[in-house]
């Protein structure tokens, strides 16, 4: 998340409380289109399970994994939550939303994107909204050879701190498939990765991370056809026990969320191994594994 120095202004918070009419109109249009796309989404045979784990009141924080595709999880998680509960998921974006203006910002906000800052999150939690965060941020997208579905969270625990402070349950949500649309060709700490770190920082804004070399279909950057697998794990209660100090509980909740997400990712990869439809082969359509 951005630092407090990059935090929302009073006007930004006011937009959360009093959504502009034009944004409200765009939101209705966007979700009307999303509802109409249901049959098309079903044709893609996306594997989904665990939607019964979503708290019915919509008051929870989704914690997911970013993939090298950079888009599948951003679209599919909010879509299936909305389809199940009828709520708009507020995705915590990096500072680009604060830099956006005009129609671009209106569309991003209408779809659910908000500045991922503690003040913004706290306000949304006070309103009881559904939030989505990817603690690994851009680092989770920059996958090198052999790093598929590995979480790059390091010590990031701000999401757990906010969930505890606002008594918000955490729902880990894993997506498998997005890291397989491209194949990473080089390893982290290779000569190329180390030599491209200065350029990488200017391109993607992450210090100490070079530029991955990837390919899609053959030698091209056309994404490889891959079925997507999505799992919503059971909610994690963030209520702090009376005799546990706050910082210790933050670490505990963060570790529980990360462990649950890693388990979901491992189980989905194992399930995928037996799925004849994993490469979207139309001849295997009817034999595709089914979600719950």
Image (cartoon, rainbow, N blue to C red):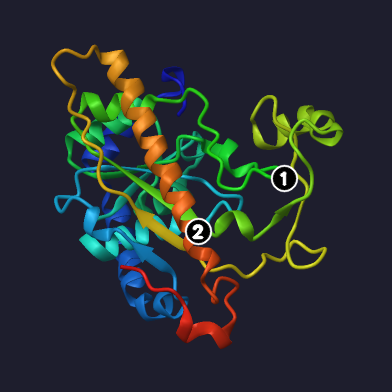
Above or below, 230 against 209 in this view is: below
Q: Residues within 10 Å of mark 2 (few under 14, many from 20)?
A: few
Q: Quadrant of residue 221?
A: bottom right
The residue located at (22%, 30%) in the rendering is 238
Residue 128 appearing in the image: yes
Quadrant in which the C terminus is drawn: bottom left
* Frontmost residue, 17 versus 167: 167
In the image, residue 241 lies at what x, y percent?
A: 16, 20
Residue 103 appearing in the image: no
Residue under pointer 1:
145
Q: Are marks 1 and 2 in contact (CB under 8 Å)?
A: no
Q: Residues within 10 Å of mark 1 (few under 14, many from 20)?
A: some
User: From the viewer's perspective, is 253 left or right of 145?
Assistant: left
* Total labels drawn: 2
Above or below, 176 against 4 in this view is: below
The residue located at (25%, 14%) in the rendering is 246
Q: Quadrant of residue 141?
A: top right
Above or below, 187 against 57 in this view is: above
Residue under pointer 2:
270
User: From the viewer's perspective, is 200 left or right of 177?
Assistant: right
In the image, residue 54 lies at what x, y percent?
A: 23, 53
Circle 2 sits in a helix, a strand or a loop, which is it?
Answer: helix
For marks 1 and 2, the one nearer the N-term is 1
* Frontmost residue, 84 versus 33: 84
């Amino acid at each position: 998340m951005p630092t407090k120095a990059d935090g929302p202004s009073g006007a930004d918070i006011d937009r959360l409380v009093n959504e502009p009419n034009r944004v409200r109109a765009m939101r209705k249009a966007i979700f009307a289109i999303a509802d109409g796309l249901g049959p098309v989404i079903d044709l893609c045979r996306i594997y989904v399970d665990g939607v019964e784990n979503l708290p019915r009141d919509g008051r929870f924080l989704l914690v997911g994994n970013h993939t090298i595709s950079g888009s599948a999880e951003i679209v599919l998680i909010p879509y299936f939550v909305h389809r199940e509960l009828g709520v708009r998921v507020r995705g915590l974006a990096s500072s680009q939303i604060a830099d956006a203006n005009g129609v671009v910002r209106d569309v991003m906000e209408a779809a659910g994107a908000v500045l991922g800052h503690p003040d913004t999150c706290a306000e949304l939690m006070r309103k009881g909204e559904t939030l989505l965060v990817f603690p690994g941020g851009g680092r989770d997208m920059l996958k090198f050879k052999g790093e598929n579905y590995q979480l790059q969270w390091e010590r990031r625990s701000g999401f757990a701190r906010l969930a505890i402070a606002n008594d918000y349950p955490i729902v880990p949500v894993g997506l498998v498939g997005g890291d397989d649309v491209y194949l990473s060709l080089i390893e982290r700490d290779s000569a190329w990765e180390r030599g491209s770190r200065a350029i990488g920082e200017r391109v993607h804004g992450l210090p100490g991370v070079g530029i991955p070399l990837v390919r899609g279909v053959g030698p091209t950057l056309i994404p490889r056809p891959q079925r997507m697998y999505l799992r919503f794990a059971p909610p994690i209660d963030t209520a702090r026990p009376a005799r546990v100090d706050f910082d210790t509980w933050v670490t505990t909740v963060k570790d529980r969320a990360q462990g649950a997400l890693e388990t979901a990712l491992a189980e989905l990869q194992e399930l995928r191994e037996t799925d004849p439809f994993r490469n979207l082969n139309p001849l295997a359509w009817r034999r595709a594994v089914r979600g719950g």
